[in-house]
Image (cartoon, rainbow, N blue to C red):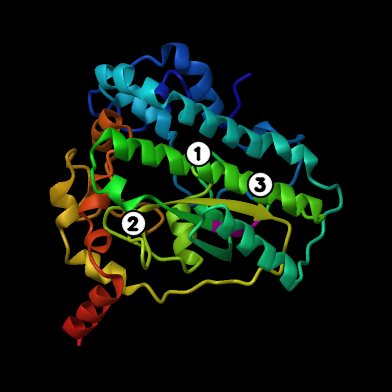
Amino acid sequence: MKTEHQPDEDSYFGLPGVKEAGIKPNSPGHLKPVLVMLDKSTVDYIPEGTPMVEPGELSRLGLNVPRIIFSLGKRRAIFLKIPRFAARIARTVINRSIGYTSLRRNPVHPKTTADESVIQEIRDMASGLGCGEVGFTSVPRDFVFSNKSILYPNAIVLTMEMNKDRVSRAPSMSTGREVCRTYDQLGVVVNKIATQLRRRGFAVQAGAALGGDVNYPRLAQKAGLGWIGKHGLLISPGRGPSQRIAAIYTSIENLPNTDSNSYEWIGDFCNNCHVCVQACPGEAIFDTKPIMNDGNPKHIDYIRCAGPFAESVGCSVCIKSCIFFRGDFEKIRQLHKKKSE
């Protein structure tokens, strides 16, 4: 049964702007069940009438990345290269699905207050499972995608660094494997932490890195984990943009809010830098960014991005070329500060 959160198959597989660009998407074929599964959201897994955090008036549409790749990528690249990543992709899809199906295990009357030992346990588990940073914040409704929803407005935000050596080879199969690894591993992490929090009596919803219900870069920026660069990726100390993001939404109302704008200078730096724009093989990064209805810039033309992304299953040239990936974060900050004085 089609829900309001599933794309209209008559409108170019739910991909906005594709018809207007004169592009005929590839048919999903045998992959259709998988892509439809990835289109599902919270509302498809919970009883009708369950209170949810609905999208705001200025929310953006959430796009299905695998659907974009399979619909807009070159068929030769898809059928020759994607199968090599089939196991990772399958696990990523399964972990995302577990994040939803496990909602039925939430306690009926969940706890809403956590002591410091619980917060520390979250940090320790995240670190032990390979995450770089953990942030805590509330989720503005405008961050929830217009075709999605979540159960709780309190978020634990996690980042995982990608292997620098593998990313530095972009675009390559090695880089593609690393992209798939971080998507896969973050799905494992959020589900494990969610399971532990349920044991502690809290209600949670695991948000996998792939196909999230919320705009992750904006959420991570709000949580003080970095700042969004010209390429639309979160830039953080020590990792630059070489990372993926996931989240856990929870009934815990007293999370230690880590909101900060201490990295706002990164935005100023990126306004005067054009390296990723020039390096992008799909010419997909806007130098002069159009402003969306929510008042924030649009960073990427996803239609142009789809081809190179599919060709190497992850592209990542924008990450490799970024000054913050190749340089020392603190030195860049000091140079920018000196130049701005």
User: Does dot 3 land on a helix, a strand or a loop?
Assistant: helix
Question: Which residue matches tag 2?
Answer: 241
Q: Nearer the viewer, residue 250 or 313?
A: 313
For the question of whether residue 332 can be seen, the reply is yes
Using residue 269 as the reference point, say whether residue 28 is left or right of it.
right
> What number is the disc on residue 339?
none
Q: Is residue 150 above or below residue 41?
A: below
In this view, 303 is above or below 134: above
**Residue 185 sits inside the magenta stretch:** no
- Magenta portion: prevailing SS class: strand
What secondary structure is marked by label 1?
helix
Query: What segment carries the magenta color?
Result: 153-157
Quadrant housing residue 226: bottom left
Amino acid bearing label 3:
Lys
User: What kind of element bears circle 2?
Assistant: loop
Of callouts 2 and 1, the N-terminal one: 1
Residue 49: x and y, percent? 77, 39
Residue on which the image places disc 3: 192
Q: Is residue 243 above or below residue 316?
A: below
Count residues near mark 1 (Cα–Cα under 10 Å), then give few for <14, some for 14-19, many for 20+. Answer: many
Q: Nearer the viewer, residue 333 or 123?
A: 123
The disc labelled 1 sits on which kind of residue?
Asp
User: Considering the image in quadrants, where does the C terminus appear?
Assistant: bottom left
Q: Which residue is mark 1?
A: 184
Of the numbered discs 1 and 3, the one sitting upstream in the chain is 1
